[in-house]
Amino acid sequence: MKKYNINVEERIRELSTIKVLGFFDQETTLYIYRETIILSIIGILCGYLAGIGLHTFIITSLPPDNAMFDPAMKISNFLYSALIMHKKIKSVNMLDALKSVD
């Protein structure tokens, strides 16, 4: 048996049923991609909301006595974090990652 992505491997019967019902190859592929994209967006939004709550908790309840922090959240905070993560993902050495043993 061929080695598939784990999402496809676990759902091969479901995808086979969709193909038997008459879906084209492109529609079947978009079925998986659409789900992945929607789950990614939901995860990002939930992460941002949890981050805002955690930031508020830390800044308001745990500041040191000799320092003062600005508790305001700005859109630039989110943009900087997204930019840093993008650069980090871009710098991953694919060959080394594939050679490593899990």
Image (cartoon, rainbow, N blue to C red):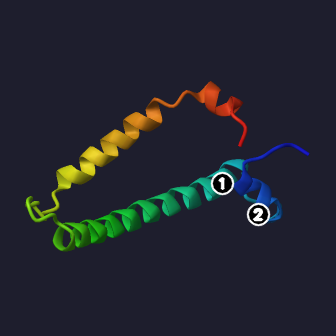
Q: Give coordinates of residue 16: x percent, y percent.
A: 82, 60
Residue nearest the viewer, comparing 60 with 53: 60
Three-letter code for the amino acid on which mark 2 is drawn: Ile
Q: Secondary structure at mark 1?
A: helix
Q: Are marks 1 and 2 in contact (CB under 8 Å)?
A: yes
The disc, 1 or 2, on the residue closer to the chain's N-terminal end is: 2
Q: Is residue 51 left or right of residue 10?
A: left
Q: Quadrant of residue 100?
A: top right
Left or right, 9 with respect to 76, comes to right
Q: Which mark is drawn over residue 90?
A: none
Q: Position of residue 31 (x, y in %)?
A: 63, 58
Q: Nearer the viewer, residue 87 or 22?
A: 87
Q: Is residue 81 above or below residue 96?
A: below
Query: Residue 93, position in %: x, y?
Result: 55, 27
Between the C-alphas of marks 1 and 2, the distance is: 9 Å
Front-lying residue, 19 or 3? 3
- Find residue 26 and report its horizontal and vertical position in percent: 66, 48
Quadrant in the picture for the C terminus: top right
Q: Is residue 95 left or right of residue 70?
A: right
Answer few, some or many: residues within 10 Å of disc 2's Cα (few below 14, many 20 plus, some between 14 and 19). Answer: some
Relative to residue 7, is residue 61 depicted above or below?
below
Residue at (57% x, 61% y) in the render: 35
Residue at the image point whose x is 40% and y is 68% from the top = 46
Report helix, strand or loop for mark 2: helix
What residue did someone put label 2 on?
Answer: 18
Q: Based on the displayed image, in which of its 4 quarters is residue 68 positioned?
A: bottom left
Outermost front residue: 65
Name the mark on residue 27. 1
The residue at the far right in this view is: 1
Which amino acid, mark 1? Glu
In this picture, residue 92 sits left or right of residue 86? right
